[in-house]
């Protein structure tokens, strides 16, 4: 059951049908964490190598994978120092090997090539003196364009609060009608709020409508575990602080896909309660928590995948109609030029690419959720414009 709720991370489920890599990165990060827990309890060569391979893949899925793994390995090293000092050198050796394989061998491009040619391994996320990036001069683009207006410029703790206790929404979209991000009491989400999960990267409260309530229940379980079980105190504390610390390094932690490991925070106490199993009441509460998280993740996955299915059906109908018409179209791909060109060529639809200004009154070719920017617009050649009708 724990494996199921971990796998149902809403970021992963929302990105299943996309080319976004946050879900892939956090999936491999989770495998590393699971392998680390297993190795620190009972070292096995197979598990060590599984952890190494997951490290390699996590590092190369996304730049932040390397950053988050440093937090994970630092927590493991601290545990070894405090509980298994005889393992420290072996542990450090395996960690260094995994990181070198991931960042230097398999990650030669981009980490090494960026260091050589851009003087910064994380370019273009970070720049160097010789190769500054746009963010350095104009500020964080996420802060300027993607952050809800009432959250822009606020502290990380405020952003953390909205990530947990926000009302489901996608502020600042749609720009024409979107208001400020809102806070809500746990378990008070409205049915209308669930529309936010149609988006593939839900911004506010993207971990589900019941996530804040589940986190409060998990805090109660964590308190019980820390009070009753001396054996799990250090591991539970280190694991929780590692997740929170890895989140707080980013000002964009309010956006679930930029801090997908937050999903693991309420699951941790349940893992330790099941492991210790001293109290039937605590185990019952852990089962309640896990069930709630599964339902919560199921809502997100259900809403999003339902939208994806309907959108795919509509797109297929549109492409079938355009193909059967045999007519040439004018089209503005916006942010989807490569995939759009491939799709039209596969369907045998002749087209002429136009700018957004030239085709502002076209028909939308199903591409994004209503209100999301960058929708694909098209018009049949010789079809009258809205202004000419």
Image (cartoon, helix red, strand yellow):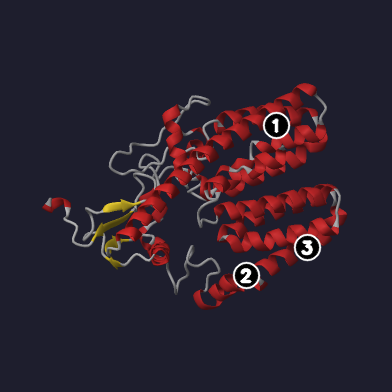
Q: Where is residue 79 in the image (x, y as percent from the top left)?
A: 78, 48
In the rendered view, tell whether residue 355 sits above or below residue 142: below
Q: Quadrant of residue 243?
A: top right
* Residue 203 in view (yes/no): no
Q: Where is residue 302 in the image (x, y as percent from the top left)?
A: 53, 38
Q: Are marks 3 and 2 in contact (CB under 8 Å)?
A: no
In the rendered view, tell whether residue 134 sits above or below residue 174: below
- Say which residue label 1 marks: 222
**360 sits to left or right of 253:** left
Q: Report the quarter where the N terminus lies.
A: top right
Disc 1 on helix, strand or loop?
A: helix
Q: Where is residue 160 in the image (x, y as percent from the top left)?
A: 51, 40
Q: Position of residue 73 (x, y in %)?
A: 71, 55
- Which residue does the image show at 50% across and 67% down from the upper left? 123
Q: Which of 185 and 322 is in front in this view?
A: 322
- Say which residue label 2 marks: 107
- Which residue does the image show at 67% across and 73% down from the upper left? 105
Residue most toward the left?
388
Q: Earlier in the sequence, mark 2 or mark 1?
A: 2
Distance between mark 1 and mark 3 Cα atoms: 31 Å
Count neighbours of disc 1 (C-alpha within 10 A) and say few if under 14, some if 14 to 19, many if 20 or more. many
Disc 3 on helix, strand or loop?
A: helix
């Amino acid at each position: 059951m724990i494996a199921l709720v971990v796998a149902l991370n809403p970021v992963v489920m929302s990105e299943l049908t996309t080319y976004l890599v946050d879900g892939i990165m956090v999936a491999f990060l989770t495998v590393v964490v699971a392998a680390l827990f297993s190795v620190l309890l009972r070292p096995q060569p197979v598990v060590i190598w599984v952890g190494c391979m997951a490290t390699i893949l996590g590092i190369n899925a996304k730049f932040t994978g390397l950053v988050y793994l440093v937090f994970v390995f630092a927590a493991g090293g601290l545990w070894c120092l405090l509980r298994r000092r005889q393992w420290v050198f072996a542990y450090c050796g395996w960690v260094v090997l995994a990181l070198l394989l991931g960042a230097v061998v398999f990650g030669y491009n981009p980490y090494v090539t960026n260091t050589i040619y851009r003087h910064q391994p994380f370019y273009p996320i970070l720049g160097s003196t010789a190769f500054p990036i746009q963010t350095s001069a104009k500020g964080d683009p996420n802060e300027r364009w993607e952050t809800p207006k009432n959250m822009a410029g606020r502290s990380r703790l405020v952003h953390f609060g909205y990530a947990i206790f926000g009302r489901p929404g996608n502020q600042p979209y749609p720009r024409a009608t979107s208001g400020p991000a809102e806070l809500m009491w746990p378990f008070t989400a409205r049915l209308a709020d669930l529309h936010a999960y149609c988006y593939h990267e839900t911004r506010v409260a993207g971990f589900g409508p019941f996530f804040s309530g589940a986190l409060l229940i998990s805090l109660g379980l964590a308190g019980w575990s820390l009070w009753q079980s001396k054996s799990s105190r250090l591991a539970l504390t280190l694991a929780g602080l590692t997740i929170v610390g890895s989140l707080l390094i980013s000002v964009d932690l309010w956006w679930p896909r930029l801090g997908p490991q937050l999903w693991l925070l309420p699951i941790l106490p349940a893992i330790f309660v099941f492991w210790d199993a001293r109290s039937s009441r605590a185990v019952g509460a852990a089962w309640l928590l896990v069930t709630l998280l599964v339902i919560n993740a199921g809502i997100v996955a259900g809403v999003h995948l339902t939208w994806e299915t309907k959108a795919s059906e509509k797109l297929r109908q549109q492409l079938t109609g355009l193909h059967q018409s045999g007519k040439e179209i004018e089209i503005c791909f916006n942010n989807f030029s490569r995939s759009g060109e491939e799709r039209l060529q596969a369907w045998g639809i002749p087209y002429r690419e136009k700018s957004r200004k030239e085709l502002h009154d076209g028909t939308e070719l199903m591409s994004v959720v209503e209100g999301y920017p960058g929708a694909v617009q098209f018009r049949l050649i010789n079809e009258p414009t809205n202004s000419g009708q």
